[in-house]
Amino acid sequence: MTLADNIPSLRASLPPSLNCDVWPADARWAAHGDLVVGGVGLTELAASHGAPTYVIDEADVRLRCRQYLAAFGAGRVSYTAKALVSVGLARWIAEEGLGLYVGSAGELRVAQAAGFPMDRVTLYGSAKTPEDLDAAYAAGVGTIVVESLSEVTRLAATAPHGQRVLLRVLAGPEPAGASDHRFGPRIGTGEAETAVARIAGQPGLRLVGFDCSVGHQVSRFSVYEREVRRIVEFCAAVHARHGVDVSQLNLGGGHAVAYSGADLGFALDAFAGRIRAVLHLELDRHRLPEPALTVSPGRAVVSRAGLTLYRIMSVIRGQDGRRVVAVDGGMTDCPTAALCGGAHTAALIGRASRAGLEPATVVGRHNDVDDVVVPTLQLPADVHPGDLLAVAGTGAYHHSRASNYHLVGRPALLSVAGGQVRTLVRRESLTDLLSRDADHSGH
Ligand SMILES: Cc1ncc(COP(=O)(O)O)c(C=O)c1O
């Protein structure tokens, strides 16, 4: 039992504890309720840069990269850019020695601007446009993921000679209620084998292995183990019937992250060890040579490193007596429901409150019923307009999925490291927004 348990008023005056699975690794409370991340006080940051603002802790991103490399080995980890990307962030990823999965000509352009080594870049996507493919060929990306039979013909006709390809396969059966629209030839229907034979029949394409994607926020290792068993069995079949040996097996990403203390973290080292053991067992059983086991996580690399700062604009009592706190952002910058069912953790920052805690709902500025940032959290009873709120775990799929709904500009993305703040992506201005309207006069 702690002192705070014995003296409730003391508990109310303490800032909430910072769960290290949820908040950036170096986040700490400072005087007057300030939250310090990357050596930068976020109260001052919000005062000088405004809100809402995305903040990303460079050290935390680099730490996650190193943990992934330690678990899987050099050359065996790519970061999937769609979770969050900017030129600056891509540079960190390149410096840490990871590869990069890009899903569009736009993400590829960012990688090029960052000087990302193109042999470490993989282009994937179930509906690659001619622009995506032309950009990939021109840049000389290392690998392209083939995701349908028709794409084999297309690549054979257009790709540079000797292009490395991975074939995305669906090992199935799919989890109940999911993935009907996932792409990739299915192993079970024989489609994947047809694709292998077609790729092998194209002298210009070099099939290096298989790629798969099991879903998102997956915390059970068994989902991946099953995938490995089925794919190794498939490797044995294509080896026997087509003489094809693969040198890479990419298990995708999807590793779960914690959004609140109630979520389980993903034990990365245990996962890597378990998957390697299953892979070795299956390879031995089928007497196959060992391919490089690779992964391409997105969310798990950047989610915890990011948080969003909001300014509270109004506080009301709802009909049920619960406080409703409206902030200056919302569904445009926080796609909460789609990502984690609204499980984000948030804390009042910038002042030490001695008021007791009460439940509150944090909503956005868009007046829509689904414009909810945090459905339920405990906030000091004296929370008021002007206060600052930090929402944790917003590094992945927040900035990259942000919209201009309500003609609201997207927040800036700032990095913090060593006590310094750097703008990775500036705040979107009204001029930016209106510049696309052909009938706007420019005033
Ligand atoms: C299509 C697709 N989406 C997303 C990801 C990454 O998912 P997550 O951010 O859940 O790790 C991958 C990784 O390979 C992918 O192939």
Image (cartoon, grey):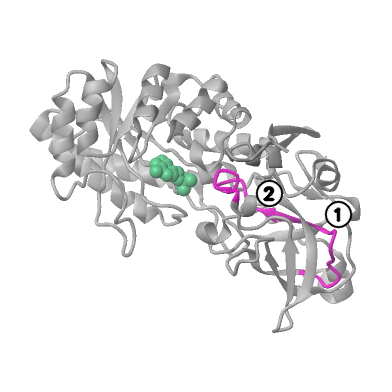
Q: Position of residue 395 (x, y in %)?
A: 61, 46
In which quarter of the view is residue 86 placed?
A: top right
Query: Does residue 364 appear anywhere in the picture?
Result: yes
**Residue drawn 54% across and 47% down?**
401
- Tag 1: Cα neighbours inside 10 Å, few (<14), some, or many (≥20)? many
Q: What number is the disc on residue 307?
A: 2
In which quarter of the view is residue 67 placed?
A: top right
The quadrant of the rendering that contains the N terminus is bottom right
Q: Is residue 398 magenta?
A: yes
Q: Earlier in the sequence, mark 1 or mark 2?
A: 2
Image height check: is 238 above or below 325?
A: above
> What amino acid type should be assigned to the residue bearing mark 1?
Gly
Image height check: is 365 above or below 226?
A: below
> What amino acid type should be assigned to the residue bearing mark 2?
Leu
Q: Position of residue 389 (x, y in %)?
A: 76, 57
Report if the beta carbon of the residue with label 1 is closer than 8 angstroms to ligand 1. no
Q: Is residue 435 magenta?
A: no
Q: Position of residue 105 (x, y in %)?
A: 44, 29
Query: Does residue 291 appear anywhere in the picture?
Result: no
**Segment tinted magenta in the rendering:** 379-404
Image height check: is 355 above or below 132?
A: below
Is disc 2 placed on a helix, strand or loop? strand
Q: Which residue is mark 1?
A: 350
Residue farthest toward the bottom in the current orientation of the protein? 320
Secondary structure that dominates the magenta span = loop
The quadrant of the rendering that contains the C terminus is top right
User: Quarter of the picture for ligand 1?
Assistant: top left
Judged left or right of residue 251, residue 85 is right
Q: What number is the disc on residue 200?
A: none
**Residue drawn 60% across and 40% down?**
439
- Tag 2: Cα neighbours inside 10 Å, few (<14), some, or many (≥20)? many
